Each structure stands twice: as C-alpha cells, then as structure tokens.
Image: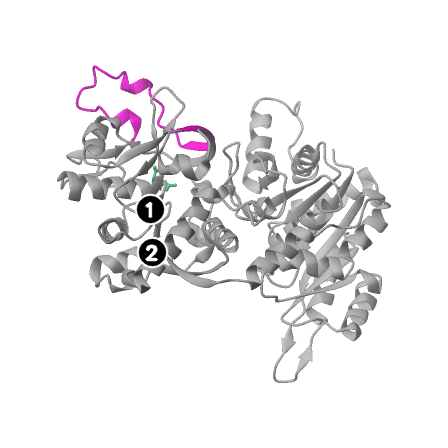
Amino acid sequence: MAKYYIFITGGVVSSLGKGITTASLGAILEARNLKVTLMKLDPYINVDPGTMSPIQHGEVFVTEDGAETDLDLGHYERFLNSKMSRYNNLTTGKIYSDVLRNERNGFYLGATIQVIPHITNEIKKCIIRAGKGFDILLVEIGGTVGDIESLPFLESIRQMAIEIGKRKILYIHLTLVPYLYPSKEIKTKPTQHSVKELLSIGIQPDILICRSDRLVPKYERSKIALFCNVPEKAVFSLEDIDSIYRIPIFLNKQGLDNYICHRFCIKCPKADLSMWETVMHQKKNTIGTVIIGIIGKYTEFPDAYRSLIAALEHAGLKNRLIIDIKLINSQSLEFSDISTLKNLDAIIVPGGFGYRGIEGKIIAAKFSREKNIPYFGICLGMQIAIIEFARNVIGLMEANSTEFIKNCKYPVIAKISEWNYRKKSIFNTYKISTKMRLGNQKCYLKLGSLAYQIYNKSIILERHRHRYEVNNLFLNKIEKSGLIVSGWSHNKYKLVEIIEYPKHPWFIGSQFHPEFNSNPRDSHPLFISFIKAAHNYQNKKNF
Ligand code: GLN
C-alpha cells in the first residue's frame, strides 16, 4: 500500500494530455526525493492492448516483465526513474476476467457477483498492489468523466477516500478551458459542467488543472474556483507549450507540488528540476537538423510510433541535433518512385505485423544498403533486412517470412517450430513454444562488433515483442555473404538478436525494441550512435 494516492481524471474532452501531465507531476514529486509510481486504468474491455490496432490505440508499450500495456506507460517511464510493470496498467477486461475466473473457481462462496462490491473490490485491490512500497501512487483514469465505461473505476476511487482516509487521497481533475476566437473569450462553463458530473458520482476534486491553448488568467481561475468549490490556489493553468519536457518546470513554477505536499503534510526537499532544465537547454542549443525516415504503415498515426519518435528525439538532444521525422508509408514505395528516400539522412524500418506494406520496406532496406545510408531495422525491420539480403545479395529470390507466405521456398524468418518443417525428425517440433517472446531478455554481444562498441559491454538486457525469428538454418549462407550476427540470445536455441553489415557505415537490425529503454536523461546508445551516423552521412553528402 502506498502512503498517499493521487487520482487524475479528465473532463470535457479526451486527448488533453492526461498521461503526460500525470507523468510530469510524477517527475516533480520524484525530484522532491519521494518514491513515486504511476498507474493507468483503462475502461475498455480488452484484457490488454496487445491485440488492438495501433490505429485505434497507438503503440503497445512493453514493460520489462513482458506486459503489453497502454502507451501512457511509455510516458511514465520516460519521465520517471521507476520502471513500470504489469501491475501498472489495468483494464476493465482484465478486472472482469479475473473476477469471472474467481467466480468459476467458487471463490465467492455462492454470492451473487455484482459491480459493487465485487468489481470495485477487485479494482481497489489492484490499485493497492500497484502502490506497495511507494510514498505516492498516481493513478490516471482513462477516458472522460461522464463515460459509462469508467464508472466502476470512479466508484472505486470514491470508496478509497472513505476506506483509506481523505487526508491520504487527492483528486485532480484535468479539464479543457477553451478560447472562443469569434468572441475572444475564455470559457469556464465546460469545466463547471465536468466538475458537476464528478460531484454527481460523489467525487469533489481537490485540484483543477486547466488545459488551454493559452495561460488561463487569474480572473477565470477565480471564477472556476468559486463555481467548482476548490480553493483559488488549487486551480492551475497548463497551456500548450513547445516541449512536453518543459511541463514539470511549468507546473512546479505554479506551485502544484508545494500545494500537494502541503495538503498531504509531507516534509521533503524542494524539487530539483535541474535535469529538466538541462533537457530544455540541450533542446535550444542545437547545431543542425537531420532528416530521419520511418518507413511504416501507420504513418498517419504518429502515436503508433510514440516510443520510437521519443527515442529519436532523445538521441537528438545528446547529439545537439533537431530530428526532422518523415513518416513514409511503405506501400507508397511499392507503387510510386522512391525519390522520397533520397532526401533522408537515415532510414528506420520499425516493428510491425502483417504483410501489408512489407515489399515497400524491403525496397527501403535495399536502398539503404546499396546507397550507404544509415539503416536501423527494429524487430520487423531487422527481419526485413534479412529477407532483402537473402534475396538480393545471396540470390534466394523467394526468401520470405512465414508470417507473410506460409510455405515460402526460403523461410529465412520463421517461428522456431517452423524452422525445420521439412525434416521434422531432427527437431521435436511440437514441443517448441511459439508464444510471443515478450519483455526483457539477455543478449550477448560479439566482441569487436559495432554493437559491442556502441554498448561498450558484452551482455545487455532489451525488451522483445515478436513471434518470428531469424531461421538459424540459413545463418551459414547469410554470414558467408557478409552480414554478421553481433548479438545472440541466452536461451537454448541461440537466437539472432542483432545483425550488422560491416561493409556499410551503419547498418544494424535488432530483434528487440531499444526504443522502450530510452528517456531524455539517458538516451539509448543505439539511437545516439544512429543519429551520429545520420549526421556523418549528411556531412559527407553535402561535402
Ligand atoms: N511480426 C514480427 C514478429 O512477430 C515482428 C514483430 C515486431 O516487429 N514487433 O516476429
């Protein structure tokens, strides 16, 4: 159980940046020497977002312990030092599936299972478990107040104030305060209505954070305070600002953390936000811009690549470079010319699933390899590099992944159980698990390789999310043709984790997702090196 709980709800509209605000507040409290963790409650009925389309939900963030979670957990890890786990994300689907399993096992001793108390008890149990060992647990409730789906979550957090004590609980409501251009007025009414809605379920917010495109002036803040029954000094303004990494500084300047610590009667040092000042300084003092192409299929939805975009930006901070990201639809490369690739300083093929757009990604990998443009293949992007290499360097034109063509002639990428499907007697195939490889796994780096130089150590831990692997039966041929394996897994199959092409200035593929391990304090070494290579390539090109 945490010592204190802060619940953050959202009002008026969605997409106000509740996740980033929650993460920023967590960062400020952590900077006051408090042990802080964060949790996201998602009202949808999927058990986790692992099966959801990135178009609907954005990226799936993978935790160290292998949970497929909401992308807000990515924000949490980028802002905080503490790592998230499967206990930090809860969905309605997960709650119901646990309660129903208990019910089938006779756990409730004949009781009629109801939303109150069985579902709400399960929610409270999970919240308490997530806060164990921490000073403060911040809980973000997904969706907008007024949604039917989030009612059990709101009811649970209402009950917690009675059970744990009002002094240990704070409710923050993040709400929209719009500016109407025709009348040149800031409107407080939507916020009043949203607070009314919260009150109708028994929650009186203690703090209001007003999201607006401009600073909400004192007059409007007092009006909101009066109508919403909160002290004036508990109404904060959060305008749209140039960088999300400035939000901790911005909220601290207004005294949000002081108000919270005072309210909880916590004695702790003032927030040391020098780290965020450094980030802002690095952001302002740049020496140039590099253009990075992400060749994917969800190019209209940057949230599908949220951690990747963030990792590139972090590496930009370390190299003092602005990162100009071009999201290029891989399918467009299949039908039109590839001139869009020519302006890029480096190419990334990110993770992905399914056949659509694959051939365009292979075209991009070929282009990078042949033109010496830095290439970074992540998960699917590494598999693409192998397929391209097998086809165009080794000459296995029908090389493919069994994910795309089940019975392809040269399955250079396949599930372990499929590697040897023609000689079933050698491998006891049916015993081999083909479950998704998820979460942190150890990887051994080859001495003297580029990967080894970049990491500067021989054993690394990185997060995975994939089913298919490089087929070891083709490794001999691949390595003989010049592509080397510079990272190996620890398990009994000795799986390929990193490939590189020594003839090329910077060509790396990783079976894991390094983007999940990057934050603005410690940018990931692979991304730092990749951005440096992009800058070198640009300098050479312009020479
Ligand atoms: N679809 C591929 C696999 O399952 C790659 C997954 C990914 O890029 N995350 O192996």
Residue depicted at 22% across the width and 44% down the height:
388
Horizontally, residue 329 falls left or right of residue 527, namely: left
Q: Which residue is identified by label 1?
A: 506
Instruction: Inspect the image, locate mark 1, and give the three-letter code of the amino acid beneath it.
Output: Trp
Within the displayed image, which quadrant is ligand 1 positioned in?
top left
Residue 436 highlighted magenta (yes or no):
yes
> Can I make out residue 313 in this image?
yes
Viewer-proximal residue, 386 or 129? 386
Q: Of the numbered discs in the image, which one, if any, rests on residue 402?
A: none
Please state the horizontal and vertical placement of residue 121, each as a whole percent of the image: 69, 35
Task: Looking at the image, tell me whether mark 1 or mark 2 is earlier in sequence order.
Answer: 1
Viewer-proximal residue, 100 or 334? 334
Q: Label 1 vs label 2: CA separation?
A: 10 Å
State the SS at label 2.
helix
* Quarter of the image with the N terminus in it: top right
State the SS at label 1.
loop
Q: Of the numbered discs in the image, which one, if any, rests on residue 537?
A: 2
Q: Are marks 1 and 2 in contact (CB under 8 Å)?
A: yes
Q: Which residues, given as a range, are shown in magenta? A: 415-444
